[in-house]
Amino acid sequence: MNNIQKTILNSYSQIFFAENQPFATILMLVSFFDFWSGVCGLFSIIVANLTAYILGYNKESIKKGLYGFNSLLTGLGVGIYFQPSIELFVIVFLGALLTLFVTLTVEGVLSKYGLPYLSIPFLFGIWAIMLSTNGFFALGLSEKGIHMQNELYSIGGATLVDLYNYFNMIDGFNSIKIYFLSLGAIFFQNNILAGVLISIGLLYYSRIAFSLSLIGFYLAYGFYEFIGADFSQLAYTFIGFNYILTSIAVGGYFIIPSYRTYFWTIILLPITVIISVSLFKIFSVWYLAIYSMPFNIVVILFLYILKLRHTKKDRLTTVFVKQSTPEKSLYLHKTASDESNGKKFFPINLPFWNKWSVMQAHNGEYTHKDDWRHAWDFVIRDNDNKQYQNSGDIVKDYYCYGKLIIAPQDGIVSEVIDGIPDNKIGDINVNQNWGNAIVIKHTELLYSQISHIRTGSFKVKKGDFVKKGTILAEVGNSGHSPYPHLHFQLQATPYVGSHTLDYPLCNYVKISNSEYNPTAFGRPELNDIVLAAEPNEIITNGLHFVPGQKINCRFESDNREIEYKWEIYKTSLNETYIYCSETNSSAYFYTNSIGFYFKNFYGDKKSALFIFFISLYNVKKIFYKNLKVKSSIRADLFYGKFALFFQDFMSPFYIYLKSKYTLDYIEEDEDDFAPEFVKLRSSIEKYIFKTKKDNIVSDIIIGSDKTIQINIEVKNIKLTISSQ
């Protein structure tokens, strides 16, 4: 029953791209301002979703209302035009089926391009019925609206009638009236009260969506006046909802909200006006309303051209996994870790073990110019910043000479050049610039090249498959190399000396002033001291969670103790999460060979799972004393609704509520043979503007027996986690 309720309500709220039950309840109420229209809409939802379920379509999509909202609109539209009768419900039934079939077909076509189907199915359904019903003489045109007050009285009594009269009798502010009428028109309601209720629900659901609805409407309103278009068209057809929905879709839902999305909303709204006016003239020939067609055209066109971009930088970032509100999409995007952002890159690691220094980085001082500018030269330096011992007159004096070179990632050896002798110190081989070199193919259009290798030291040959960490050869001094060093670059072609790619390296640690700072994806800079990150067995085993696994949790606080059972699940999008059935809470996480990262949390923020989430929000599965992991964490997880209300309005432009997460690596058991624990300490600092307001500190012990203990002294909380 709970799923049925969610399915029905989400079918209402999905019209505004939402999954919010209070908002959906308001929309459902508004649809019943015309009782029989509301009944037809509800009937259409049931028909569409039940049919989708019987046909075996995705239950999660059904529950989200994705297969119901278009049929809802068709049912509302048909119900508002005709008198209630058996014949009408037959037509509504068939219209709901037709709209669903179009929904499933259009989804199959547009999903190939990563595009939404919006309300295109509704347009097909309503137009087909409106054109065909001219010959359906058993259907009588509706007289609803003539006795509107009687109809409202039957729904909400005298109070609802008084509200209706109050809003309809307000003088002045014509644009505000049309704004409310346009909102109501989305549900085929021609009264201001419907629009007022929808606007209140929209404000409750999302401040960004509410502000965009006003911006979209008034941009169009102003453009009508600016170009001298017939404003009466907007006033008596109430097609202003096209501008409202376009603004919400582009400004905040399908694209991460920012000042750039608001700018493009300003550009796209006049285009939507032009399309609306032109379509109105065309469709009036067939006595058809254009409904939401302009909104569909503009949004799909814009999203499609974004898909075709050659460079997809952070200027306009489309939403991949839809969140419950535009605000949450924005806050998640702003605090997404480097690990999450770097998932689009195939991971390429450092080609060596231990500590090395960057002697020359991108756009180097000596070489690394023009088409070969994206490369690194690595050397080993001692505490005195010297690259060699003794006099440094021979290659063997250099610390890096003869050191092992390893495969930076799995791949196939595409090219090997050997037989070029090492240079004497200070000499270079200008005829054989790259010296002895190896090229490895990792993916299509991604190769790594390592050069200046010691002759005769290769352990692999062309055509060999190598795993990450496989020993390839030894560092030498061949080619254009006055002293021993390792040259490393990424490229798109399999030839030695190919043009370089600006591509990041992954999972390395930068050492600075005795502090170890991990980097998920980055580009080492000149004089950086870097170290390939190696996983710590205790942390790796302690945070090893797989779907189907069960976890025991003992929560102790204020002399009370509660036992919880958690379980690991996986979604259809291959997202893994920890679920606590007792508190109905979920913590989504992502893991790789070197890190464990929480991404999102839903549910009870006073639960044990939430404490686990904030304590181990961003963990590198490595251990170096004085290692620090720093990242941002969503402020909306820690601030109340009142504080967030004002932040939400400003969030696309400036975020002043911030939370910062720090994880310190304190101690590792010094037993070299069988270490038993690792101690960590995490802290979350909350800020308003730049003023620190609060601090939550968690002491964490991860044991070799895969147990995790978390203590928060200031809140007198202790958590003990153990895997089954």
Image (tube, rainbow, N blue to C red):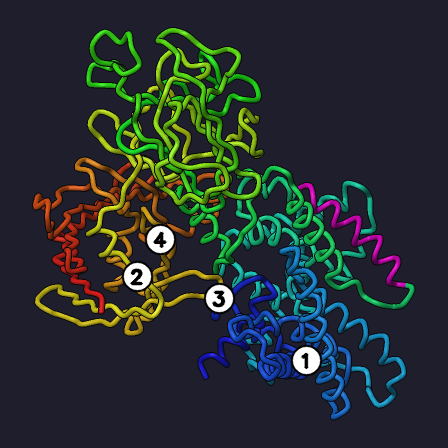
**Going by the image, does 651 lie left or right of 568?**
right
| CB within 8 Å, label 4 to label 2 | yes
N-terminal of the two: label 4 or label 3? 3
N-terminal of the two: label 3 or label 1? 1
Q: Disc 1 or disc 4, which is closer to the eye?
A: 4
Q: Which residue is mark 2?
A: 545
Q: Amino acid at mark 2?
A: Phe
Asked if the stretch drawn in magenta spans residue 282, the answer is yes
Q: Which residue is mark 3?
A: 572
Q: Secondary structure at mark 4?
A: strand
Q: Secondary structure at mark 2?
A: loop
Give 123 or 158, whichever is nearer the viewer: 123
In the rendering, which numbered label is found on residue 559?
Answer: none
N-terminal of the two: label 1 or label 2? 1
Q: Amino acid at mark 3?
A: Ser
Within 10 angstroms of label 1, few (less than 14), some, or many (20 or more) residues?
A: many
Residue placed at 48% from the left, 20% from the top? 434
Q: Which residue is mark 1?
A: 37
Q: CA distance from mark 4 to mark 3?
A: 17 Å
Q: Disc 1 or disc 2, which is closer to the eye?
A: 2
| CB within 8 Å, label 3 to label 1 | no
Where does the magenta region start and end? 266-284
The image quadrant that residue 565 belongs to is bottom left
Asked whether residue 153 is in view, the answer is no
Quadrant holding the C terminus: bottom left
Asked if the stretch drawn in magenta spans residue 530, the answer is no
In the rendering, which numbered label is found on residue 591?
Answer: 4
Q: CA distance from mark 1 to mark 4?
A: 50 Å
Q: Secondary structure at mark 1?
A: helix
| SS assignment for the magenta stretch, majority | helix
